[in-house]
Image (spheres, rainbow, N blue to C red):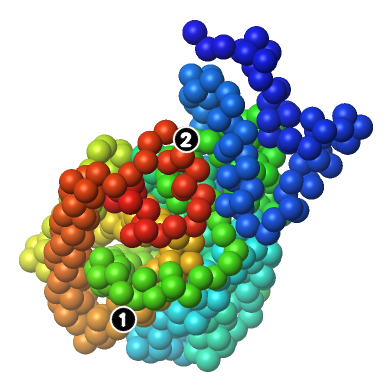
């Protein structure tokens, strides 16, 4: 039976988290906590202090409290993440896709080639801003950066309704990409700070599953906008105004309530924050360290496993860039009008929700993150082959093959998760994630240019290129798993690790995955 803090003569939960309180009862508890926060610029130092206090408590009680903390994070923080990142942000990106059937190209005098460059413009902005955002996320509070970014993002999204030519659209989409470069690495980093390694792949799959909800809502919004009559602006501009306003308002929620980490989660009590830090200490990657360490950048450059991640990022990017921007064009090519095209995209959202939750559940099993990525490639590849081979008169079957392309979601998000799971050392992880997302965006830039105007509606060059990208992703992921398995076996044979509390504390020493001998890679 767990021993209570009072019976064991241990300090109270409040005193354990805030040691200054024990020295002077006249100091207000909140002020004492603020002094602890400002004592260091690095969350690893703060996390180590809080962890050492947590070790005074009975482990059985900490385990029981950890379940309550996980429930709070799952039901309060996780909805904020998925409402923001992969519902509103995905909806913002997809506005270009949804506005296409309603005369966007005709009103802006764009050719299909121009449209491909506008689709790529967002990723040019992202590739420019990827490294600066990753460095900023290491040094500054995550929630404040995201909240401020959303204000600017919402305004830029609404500005798309004011442009009238190719160059204006390209410029706005470029700056939208610069804002979006913050989102994905921020959520990967925040997820690694709030959930354990065993929990992360399922949580990231859940927040990406809202892409499916976004696809359904976006399709219905596009359909509703197309039904509006008597407007002084074209119907496609209404889509940008609605989505941009929603994004701006959501920024207020994020900047007010989203935590920067377990240390300042407003929905947790002081004792629960301590438990939250104790929970993630088992990840062996600490919280966040604000000091850049050049030797960790060198290690990232010399780590062969990382290059397999970068190559898989390119493959995933090509798939995402092609599918996200041309799905409506493919469906419309099967003979649907603009309104019908919008509605026929909605079922694809349901496919994505089911795929993300299912493959996220699979990835949560032991040694199954990599296999979940490989298995997740199969539905999309089967759909691409169907688009290429099914007779054109069977348009419903062809449309169903398009819906299967939404199953790409779990491959994307689980691939994003791997650097957060398997790279330790905050500077090294920043370098790896920054480079990974640059490669991912390079793929997104290339993807839309596989679609050639002369190949409507099947786009055989694009379909073959996307099939090749799926195949490359499967091979690269298999090689990465093999490399990690061999390294884990080598470390197990060497038996170079410590046990108990010292092992947890070493996780806050900002060591890389190569330095930390008891770090084990997730397969």
Q: Distance from label 1 to label 2 (Cα)?
A: 48 Å
Mark 2 = which residue?
A: 501
Residue at left 45%, top 79%? Answer: 127
Label ID, residue 148: none
Residue at left 87%, top 29%? Answer: 25
Residue at left 33%, top 60%? Answer: 514
Residue at left 69%, top 39%? Answer: 266
Depicted 3 relative to depicted 244: above or below: above
Q: How many marks?
A: 2
Q: Secondary structure at mark 1?
A: helix
Mark 1 = which residue?
A: 446
Left of 357 or right of it: where is 289? right
458 or 92, which is in the foreground? 92
Q: Position of residue 162 (x, y in %)?
A: 63, 80
Q: Secondary structure at mark 2?
A: helix
300 or 128, which is in the foreground? 300
Q: Position of residue 432 (x, y in %)?
A: 39, 68
Task: From the image, state whether disc 1 or disc 2 is nearer to you.
Answer: 2
The answer to which of marks 1 and 2 sits earlier in the sequence is: 1
Farthest right residue?
A: 26
Left of 397 or right of it: where is 226? right
């Amino acid at each position: 039976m767990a021993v209570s803090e009072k019976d064991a003569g241990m300090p109270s939960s409040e005193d354990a988290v805030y040691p200054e309180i024990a020295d002077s009862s006249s100091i207000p508890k909140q002020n004492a906590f603020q002094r602890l926060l400002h004592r260091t610029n690095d969350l690893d130092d703060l996390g180590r202090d809080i962890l050492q206090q947590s070790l005074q408590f009975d482990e059985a009680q900490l385990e029981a409290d950890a379940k309550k903390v996980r429930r709070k994070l799952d039901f309060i923080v996780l909805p904020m993440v998925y409402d923001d990142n992969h519902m509103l942000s995905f909806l913002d990106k997809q506005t270009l896709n949804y506005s296409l059937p309603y005369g966007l190209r005709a009103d802006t005098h764009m050719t299909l080639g121009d449209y491909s460059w506008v689709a790529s413009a967002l990723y040019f902005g992202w590739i420019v801003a990827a490294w600066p955002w990753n460095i900023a996320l290491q040094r500054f509070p995550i929630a404040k950066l995201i909240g401020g970014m959303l204000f600017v993002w919402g305004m830029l999204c609404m500005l798309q309704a004011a442009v009238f030519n190719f160059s204006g659209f390209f410029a706005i989409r470029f700056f939208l990409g610069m804002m979006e470069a913050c989102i994905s690495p921020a959520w990967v980093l925040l997820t690694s700070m709030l959930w354990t390694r065993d929990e992360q792949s399922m949580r990231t799959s859940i927040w990406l599953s809202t892409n499916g909800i976004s696809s359904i809502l976006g399709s219905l919004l596009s359909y509703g906008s197309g039904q509006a009559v008597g407007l002084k602006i074209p119907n496609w501009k209404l889509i940008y105004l609605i989505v941009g306003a929603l994004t701006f308002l959501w920024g207020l929620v994020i900047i007010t309530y989203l935590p920067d980490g377990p240390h300042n989660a407003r929905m947790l009590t002081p004792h629960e924050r301590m438990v939250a830090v104790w929970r993630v200490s088992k990840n062996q990657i600490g919280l966040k360290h604000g000091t850049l360490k050049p030797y960790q950048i060198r290690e990232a450059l010399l780590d062969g496993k990382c290059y397999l991640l970068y190559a898989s990022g390119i493959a995933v990017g090509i798939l995402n860039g092609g599918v996200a921007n041309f799905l409506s064009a493919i469906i419309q090519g099967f003979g649907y009008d603009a309104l019908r095209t919008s509605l026929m995209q909605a079922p694809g959202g349901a496919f994505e929700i089911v795929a993300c939750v299912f493959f996220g559940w699979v990835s949560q099993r032991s040694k199954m993150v990599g296999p979940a990525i490989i298995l997740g490639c199969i539905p999309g590849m089967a759909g691409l082959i169907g688009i290429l081979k099914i007779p054109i008169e069977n348009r419903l079957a062809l449309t169903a093959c398009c819906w299967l392309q939404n199953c790409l979601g779990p491959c994307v998000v689980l691939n994003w998760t791997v650097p957060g799971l398997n790279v330790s050392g905050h500077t090294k992880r920043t370098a790896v994630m920054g480079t990974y997302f640059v490669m991912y965006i390079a793929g997104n830039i290339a993807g839309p240019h596989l679609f050639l105007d002369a190949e409507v509606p099947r786009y055989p060059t694009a379909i073959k290129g996307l099939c090749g990208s799926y195949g490359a992703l499967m091979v690269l992921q298999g090689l990465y798993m093999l490399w990690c398995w061999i390294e884990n076996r080598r470390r197990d044979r060497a038996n170079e690790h410590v046990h108990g509390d010292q092992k947890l504390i070493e996780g806050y020493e900002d060591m890389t995955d190569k330095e930390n001998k008891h770090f084990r890679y997730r397969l």
